[in-house]
Amino acid sequence: MKNKVCMITGANSGIGKETALQLAKLGSKIIMVCRDKVRGEEALSDIISQSGNNSIELFISDLSSLHSVRKLAFDFLASHKRLDVLINNAGVLMKKRTLTIDGLESTFVINHLSHFLLTQLLLDILKESAPARIINVSGDIHKFASTIDFEDLNGDQGYGAWNRYNQSKLANILFTYEMARKLDPNEVTINALHPGAVRTNLVRSSKIMKFFSNTLGLIFMKNPRKGAKTTVFLASSSGVEGISGKYFINKKEKKSSKASYDLELQKTLWETSEELIYDE
């Protein structure tokens, strides 16, 4: 991984920060994508200090804004000539229904659509850097979603925080499988993963999850370092070279939900996502 360029969204805390740290220790050049400048700079300083690697850069981007995602890609492409690994890690659990500046439901945009757009914008540089890798951080909680409610993507007809989160994690895998068929695995691979139940800032959006994380979660939930292991494995291991369109848990290939293999659902999500990013 020495001198390989790795971009990680949501890199200022939790799994994202730990992933950045571990890849920095392996000698990678890290591109941290963070929403908050102050927290991003603090995380950047911590990673440099702990890894001894000074090749860490911070890009500020609000993934709830498709315009901000476009600016992130534009700024990166204007200053870099290669990208070896793109890690779509950022995620939120919104307790209450909120709409983004683009008028779209926030969980769907931040967890899926922003990463869909970012991946498309960076695909050419990934191909030019071949062999390159795309990694989507999903989760086994996607199995609680039997489909994507395309008739009510914005939650106008009813909003359930966990239902929306589960659907967004299913979307991560549907996107992974559909894109894998469109890519030459000798150029760019794309895989999804379940990091495990991890104590992260995601729980800030839920009082129940925050309580669990601070009590029983100390025993039953992974810390971010353990949670990042599969992400780091997919980014760095020669053992997964050329492997694409798969779902991993604990560094091993596993089956995802039945719904995630629905070819029509994959196609519909892709087409819907394309319409939304081009309408922006």
Image (cartoon, helix red, strand yellow):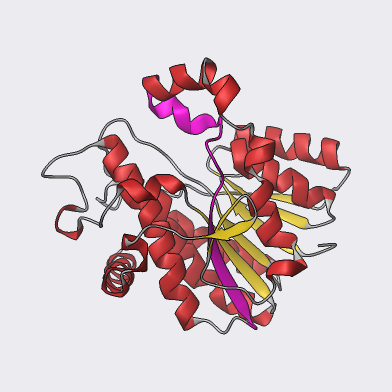
| Picture residue at 31% right of the left edge, 30% below the top | 95
Question: Which residue shows up at 71% across the image and 73% down it?
Answer: 81
Note whether 230 is above or below 161 in the view shown: below
In the displayed structure image, the side of residue 188 where residue 52 appears, left or right: right
Please tell me in which quadrant of the rendered image residue 171 appears: bottom left
- Answer whether residue 272 is magenta in the image: no
Q: Quadrant of the C terminus?
A: bottom left
Would you say residue 55 is visible in this rendering? yes
Q: In this orientation, which residue lies closer to the viewer: 4 or 184?
A: 184
Q: Which residues are magenta?
A: 186-207
How many marks are shown on the rendered structure? 0
Furthest residue toward right: 52
In the rendered image, which quarter contains the N terminus?
Answer: bottom right
**For the point 76% across and 46% down, which residue is it?**
22
- Residue 65 showing in the rendered view: no
- In the foreground, 127 or 55: 127
Residue 221: x and y in percent read: 56, 29
Residue at the left extreme, as displayed: 157
Q: Position of residue 197 (x, y in %)?
A: 52, 36
Q: Nearer the viewer, residue 185 or 260?
A: 260
Q: Does the magenta run of residues contain 204?
A: yes
The percent position of residue 261, horizontal first and vertical second, equals: 36, 68
Q: Quadrant of residue 40?
A: top right
